[in-house]
Amino acid sequence: MRCQADCGCAPPEELPAFVKALASRCDGYPLVALIEAENSPDNSLVSIIAALGFCGILLQPKKVEQTILSQIKVENIGNFMAKARASNLQAGVLGMIEAPDIPRLLPYSPDWLGFIVKHPVKSGQFGDSATNSLVRALLPVDSEQDHIVENSGLGTDRIIVEDFILPIEIGAYKREYGHKQKVRFNVKADVERLSSNPEDMRHIFSYDLILDGIKNLVSLGHVELVETLAERIAALILAYPRVQRVIVRVDKLELGPTAVGVEIERHKTKI
């Protein structure tokens, strides 16, 4: 059974009455709010929605004809998910999603991934049978799925990210607080192979996971030491079951020499 309701806009002071009327029409069914956003969602709305009795919240970009990640930064989606869960809400996204987007969204454990289907359906779009099969394969059935790689016997591939430069807040000196400086990241990750003949996203470890992880970590605020940031990046990448070894180099680029920084190498801890 589904409950359909007319939705509209209301000023903040009228929202409680609006939600009460909506709940009465849905006869006890859980309510899920939908928020439209562009680039950065308004996280302040999450606590308001939780207080009004909703059980969940969906994030949708304003331009539904464009992909979600072309409009909203993945780290902003992650922050939105964390805020929702801190308010005891389920959370998800709704919109145009491409197959390579799925591994980038899954680390944030969305409760829902809503796909918008274009008509007529074209090859490579969600709704096309081949693309639907690929999308289904990218969504894990359970948390144990990744463990199948342990005895693959195919060795490892090395995923490389070179000269990824971001302006971030970093440094132990007082003069380094309150402004950003350029920092360069180089990462090499040895990843268990799933196939001797990789053909699609199911068979590879996306470098986007490394880029997104770095951007998410630096978005958390000021870090005093490059060593601290390097360790956090290494730990984040090694948390993926397929990653066996990682080399992380973090360089500050604005202190006189061409670069000053640290390079660390970390291995998967065998249990």
Image: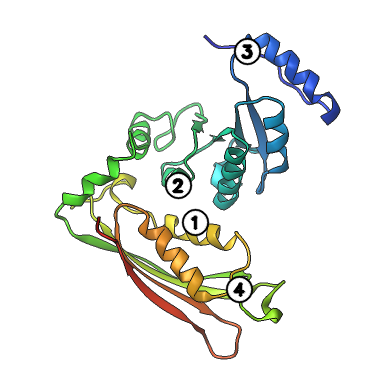
Q: Which of marks 4 and 2 is nearer the N terminus?
A: 2
**For the residues marked 1 and 3, what is the alpha-carbon distance in whole angstroms?**
37 Å
Single out the mark in the foreground, 2 or 3. 2
User: In the image, residue 192 lies at what x, y percent?
Assistant: 24, 56
Q: Earlier in the sequence, mark 1 or mark 3?
A: 3
Disc 3 secondary structure class? loop
Q: Residue 107 carries which label?
A: 2
User: Dot 3: few (<14), some (14–19), or many (≥20) neighbours within 10 Å?
Assistant: few
Disc 1 secondary structure class? helix
Query: Residue beneath label 1, please?
Result: 212
83 or 202, nearer to the observer = 83
Residue at the spot x=50%, y=78% of the render? 251
Disc 4 secondary structure class? loop
**For the residues marked 2 and 3, what is the alpha-carbon distance in whole angstroms?**
32 Å
Q: Earlier in the sequence, mark 2 or mark 3?
A: 3
Look at the image and tell me whether residue 195 can be seen: no
**For the residues marked 1 and 2, what is the alpha-carbon distance in whole angstroms?**
10 Å
Tag 3: amino acid: Gln
**For the residues marked 4 and 1, what is the alpha-carbon distance in whole angstroms?**
18 Å
Badge 1 vs badge 2, beta-carbon distance below 8 Å: yes
Single out the mark in the foreground, 4 or 1. 4
Q: Which of marks 4 and 3 is nearer the N terminus?
A: 3
Q: Quadrant of residue 176?
A: bottom right
Single out the mark in the foreground, 4 or 3. 4
View extreme (front): residue = 271
Tag 4: amino acid: Ile
